Image (cartoon, helix red, strand yellow):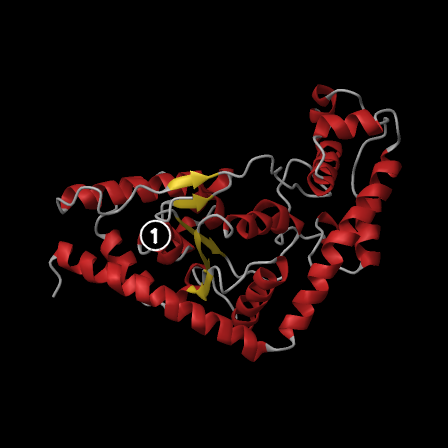
């Protein structure tokens, strides 16, 4: 692979990551580090756009790092650090605030979703955080960003800001226009209680998700209680797609078993969903329990996790400062 390819991805430190994070992002992160230069950032500055209890924020940052390591992200191959440890993120965000346009931010749909009905009470940080996200990416001149469907709009904004900076300061191709990295064959993992919603920590019922630290008993119980369908497993994908919860369970099984959905349907059509659930529980327990045990082991040594972050921040800061020096010169800052 071309050495110039740099991957950047930021993960919110929400704590207690779940199966959706694992299949939708973390497994892909592990694969990418074999092919490209990867920078994985725990975005604690993004987290404080809504109020966080300081002790909880610190715990969540460390748990996110532990989860990175437990799933196979290697700090000797990839840079792992927390965003606030590299001041260049905040500095570049301010410069890009002055490049980005209010009209662009007004089109961001996630602000409307997160701010809710009373937007006047939302923090300014929540409104302008897409500019900070652009700074995260452009600070390292990242060429590629792993994204899900809900982040494509933010990446497009980053590209617009990069293009405008290059034009405003007459420095063609200074910032590369980052490309989306959309993993092949990775299904969106949906709630076990409502197949139309993404699996999320924010959903009230813990039965809606498989947490990476769940016990074997908890995993088995959640899968048994997961919504499916009263009819047997259908033969055709077209029929299955109309049944959101059933399709979600088949998709998760397909991903974990490394079999196509059509092959899973060939094997299981006509059977009851209890059969699928039994097989799915076995796969989940064999895959998730070792990860959960490793997360707990790593969390017992907080000093080691902080050391990983510190070393990663030092590496990230070298790249950031070199790029910032050039950025300041372009803008005319002494």
Which element carries disc 1, helix, strand or loop? Answer: helix
> Would you call the spot at circle 1 few (<14 residues within 10 Å), some (14-19), or many (20 or more)?
some
- Hey, which quadrant is residue 125 in on the image? bottom left
39 to 84, vertically: above or below: above
Is 51 in front, or is 157? 157
Which quarter of the rendered picture does the C terminus lie within? Answer: bottom left
Q: Is residue 108 visible?
A: no
Q: In x, y percent, where is residue 210?
A: 72, 52
Is 229 in front, or is 249? 249
Is 92 in front, or is 182? 182
Who's the residue at 20% across and 46% down the image?
A: 165
- Hey, which quadrant is residue 244 in on the image? top right
Who's the residue at 76% across and 33% down the image?
A: 246
Who's the residue at 72% across and 36% down the image?
A: 254
Q: In x, y percent, where is residue 243?
A: 73, 28
Q: In x, y percent, where is residue 245?
A: 73, 35
Who's the residue at 80% across and 56% down the image?
A: 218
Q: Say which residue label 1 marks.
A: 128
Q: Is residue 73 visible?
A: yes
């Amino acid at each position: 692979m071309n050495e110039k390819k740099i991957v950047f991805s930021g993960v919110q430190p929400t704590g207690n990551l779940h199966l959706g994070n694992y299949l939708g992002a973390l497994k892909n992160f592990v694969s990418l580090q074999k092919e490209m230069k990867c920078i994985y950032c725990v975005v604690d500055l993004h987290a404080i756009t809504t109020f966080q209890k300081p002790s909880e924020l610190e715990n969540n940052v460390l748990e996110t790092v532990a989860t990175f390591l437990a799933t196979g992200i290697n700090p000797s191959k990839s840079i792992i650090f927390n965003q606030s440890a590299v001041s260049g993120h905040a500095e570049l965000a301010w410069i890009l605030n002055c490049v980005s346009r209010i009209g662009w931010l007004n089109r961001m749909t996630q602000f409307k979703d997160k701010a809710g009905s009373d937007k006047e009470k939302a923090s300014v940080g929540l409104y302008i955080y897409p500019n900070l996200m652009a700074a995260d990416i452009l600070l390292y001149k990242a060429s590629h960003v792993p994204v899900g469907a809900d982040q494509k709009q933010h990446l497009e904004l980053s590209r617009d800001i990069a293009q405008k900076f290059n034009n405003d300061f007459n420095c063609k191709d200074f910032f590369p226009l980052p490309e989306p990295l959309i993993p092949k064959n990775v299904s969106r993992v949906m709630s076990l209680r409502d197949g139309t919603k993404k699996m999320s920590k924010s959903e009230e019922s813990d039965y809606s998700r498989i947490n990476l630290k769940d016990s074997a008993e908890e995993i088995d119980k959640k899968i048994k209680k997961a919504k499916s369908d009263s009819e047997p497993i259908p033969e055709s994908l077209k029929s299955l797609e109309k049944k959101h919860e059933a399709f979600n369970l088949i998709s998760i099984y397909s991903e974990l078993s490394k079999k196509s959905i059509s092959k899973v349907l060939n094997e299981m059509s006509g059977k009851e969903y209890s059969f699928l659930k039994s097989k799915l529980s076995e796969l989940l327990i064999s895959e998730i329990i070792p990860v959960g045990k490793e997360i707990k082991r790593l969390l017992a040594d907080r000093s080691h996790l902080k050391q990983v972050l510190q070393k990663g921040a030092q590496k990230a800061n070298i790249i950031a400062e070199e790029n910032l020096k050039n950025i300041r010169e372009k803008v005319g800052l002494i």
